[in-house]
Amino acid sequence: MRFIFGAAAVLVLLTGCQPAEEKSSTPSEGDTKAAPAQTPVERGKYLTRVGGCNDCHTPKTFTNGMEFDMTRELSGHPAGDKLPPVPAKLIGQGGYGTLANAHLTAWVGPWGVSYAMNLTPDKAHGLGSWTEQMFIDAIRSGKHQGTGRAILPPMPWNWYRDMTDEDLKATWAYLQSLPPISNAIPDPTPPDKVPR
């Protein structure tokens, strides 16, 4: 019996307890498969998905619950979608900090109303008239086209501004690869003009 326990202990030591310097998480010489390199468009698609861009910039369908309408991917707040009136004193101290429409593409807060932008390469209503540098500058500065009006909540540009140039360029490449969707987004509404 003593021999069996001793042999088991030796086996455990030999098979599972290598010194720390001998353990390695790198692939063995026989396993040299590397992950395939992503194109900038593939990388940008990945970044827009994990970054939650569709949450606000893609209209929703309401057939089996709320789902992204990928036929209008990243086209922003649906043109012509009217917001219901916001009761006075609903937003602010003692009330709510923000409200969103059903598509999560329009947001009401102390800043007024902001609408998710059309990120497709449509020249009239989307990013088709922008340059890559304008896009990067907008994300870095929180200003429309990098120099215009402030980008309003809930757009978390202040989180995305720390993305690498390479990742911002990949995101731009993906957005430019989308089909252009003609969808005019309203200008932001100042707080004193919010529908009541």
Image (tube, rainbow, N blue to C red):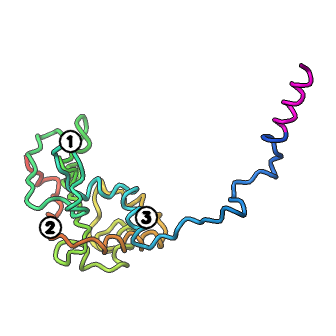
What amino acid type is highlighted by mark number 1?
Gly
Q: Main secondary structure of the magenta part?
A: helix
Q: Which residue is mark 2?
A: 183
Give the SS element for disc 3: loop
Q: Is residue 131 magenta?
A: no
**Range of magenta residues:** 1-13
Which mark is in front, 2 or 3? 2
Q: Which residue is mark 3?
A: 161
Q: Name the quadrant containing residue 71.
A: bottom left
Q: Residue furthest right?
A: 3
Q: How far, Cα to Cα, is label 3 from label 1?
A: 33 Å
Query: x%, y% of residue 63?
Result: 15, 45
- Left or right, residue 47 beside residue 127: right
State the residue at coordinates (27%, 71%): 178
State the residue at coordinates (12%, 52%): 194
Query: x%, y% of residue 54?
Result: 29, 57
Q: How far, Cα to Cα, is label 2 from label 1?
A: 24 Å
Q: Which mark is residue 65?
A: 1
Q: Is residue 4 magenta?
A: yes
Decide which of tag 2 and tag 1 comes sooner along the chain. 1
